[in-house]
Image (spheres, rainbow, N blue to C red):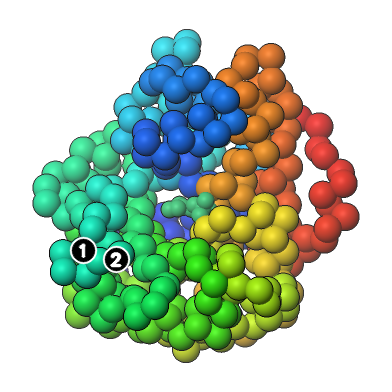
Amino acid sequence: MSQHAENLRAITKAMMAKGKGILAMDESNGTCDKRFQKVGIQTSVDKRRDYREMILTTPNLGDYISGAILYDETIRQMSRDGKPLVKICQEAGIIPGIKVDMKAKDLAGFPGEKVTEGLDGLRDRIAEYYEMGARFAKWRAVIAIGENIPSHACVEANAHALARYAALCQEGGLVPIVEPEVLIDGNHSIARCFHITDATLHSVFNQLHTQGVALDRMVLKPSMVISGKGCPEQASVQEVATFTVRCLLRNVPALVGGVAFLSGGQTPERAAAHLNEMNVQYGDICPWPVTFSYARAIQQPALEAWKGEDANVKTAQELLLHRAKCNSAARRGEYSSDMEKQLVAV
Ligand code: 13P
């Protein structure tokens, strides 16, 4: 294996390190501001910087988090004391990653469906991010479930873009996180979510194969197979674990470097419980490590406690570390709801 391939493999292994997972903190400015506004935090470049600095300076975060996905603004930002945030990340033992997609846009000819853009100029952007210290990347495709959707056109267009992005990342020295998110919105059953996730993963791995992506040097970031948010009948933790692992086993080749789930709007406790159940019940038969790459399910309690105030930093960091710790336990199949009662002191 070439040195280039060895390096990608080593990064993939480090991202999937035992007992650790990935922290997604790559909200675009628009999404970050929306989340700030919801809890009454003023929106500005500096507030976003303060928030990201608060997260990355959480003591011992690197014990539970292997990598952090940053946004373009963040990877270029300095802390209040003038230290690059990317350096703070590295010093915490956390590998910096970067979101490189340019968001999901309306898919022409298919109302209600999206295709993720960002392939133009991507080779150059990857080179720049690599120089800045990023060692992995993320691209999110969005598949909505509804009446007569997703269309074949939507699934194929997104899978194709994901595969071209992944190939460019590997060429440029970044490990690609391939994220096809089947949205939780809607009143569909878990069976329908299974069917759509199955078709989506099948198409994604077909395209990854066509584009020559090395599977042992990438991470899959799927959504869980779960009941739609508005479905009157909500599947149990056990059912979600069983459907999800079954869907993965049908579609994800054994060579894939790892699976790191998104939380997709689940409560923090549910996201931890689902991941835990998969590792408890099926950890032995899954050929890849199964961990988390959550944003909301790790950040939300901390964001609400922080409120944009310096005085709340310590409490917010405690809450963030607590969620990281709970999900780290779930990664090992050692999470229990009792853990929610013990808040760790930072
Ligand atoms: P959530 O865990 O909040 O779904 O976010 C993960 C992510 O990276 C979305 O792209």
CB atoms at circles 2 and 1 under 8 Å apart?
A: yes
**Towards the viewer: 236 or 335:** 236
**Towards the viewer: 247 or 321:** 247
State whether residue 212 appears in this view. no
Which disc number belongs to residue 107?
A: 1
User: In the rendered image of this protein, does residue 200 appear above or below residue 142?
Assistant: below
Q: Which residue is mark 2?
A: 113
From the viewer's perspective, tell me whether residue 258 is left or right of residue 235.
Answer: left
**Quick one: label 1, few (<14), some, or many (20+) residues within 10 Å?**
some
From the viewer's perspective, tell me whether residue 72 is left or right of residue 68.
Answer: left
User: In the rendered image of this protein, does residue 36 appear above or below residue 20?
Assistant: above
**Quick one: label 2, few (<14), some, or many (20+) residues within 10 Å?**
many
Q: Earlier in the sequence, mark 2 or mark 1?
A: 1
Gap between marks 2 and 1 measured at Cα = 6 Å
Q: Position of residue 30 (x, y in %)?
A: 37, 36
What residue is shown at x 24% (from left), y 55% (from top)?
105
From the viewer's perspective, tell me whether residue 56 is left or right of residue 168.
Answer: right
What residue is shown at x 69% (from left), y 46% (from top)?
323
State whether label 1 is within 8 Å of ligand 1.
no
What residue is shown at x 59% (from left), y 30% (from top)?
39
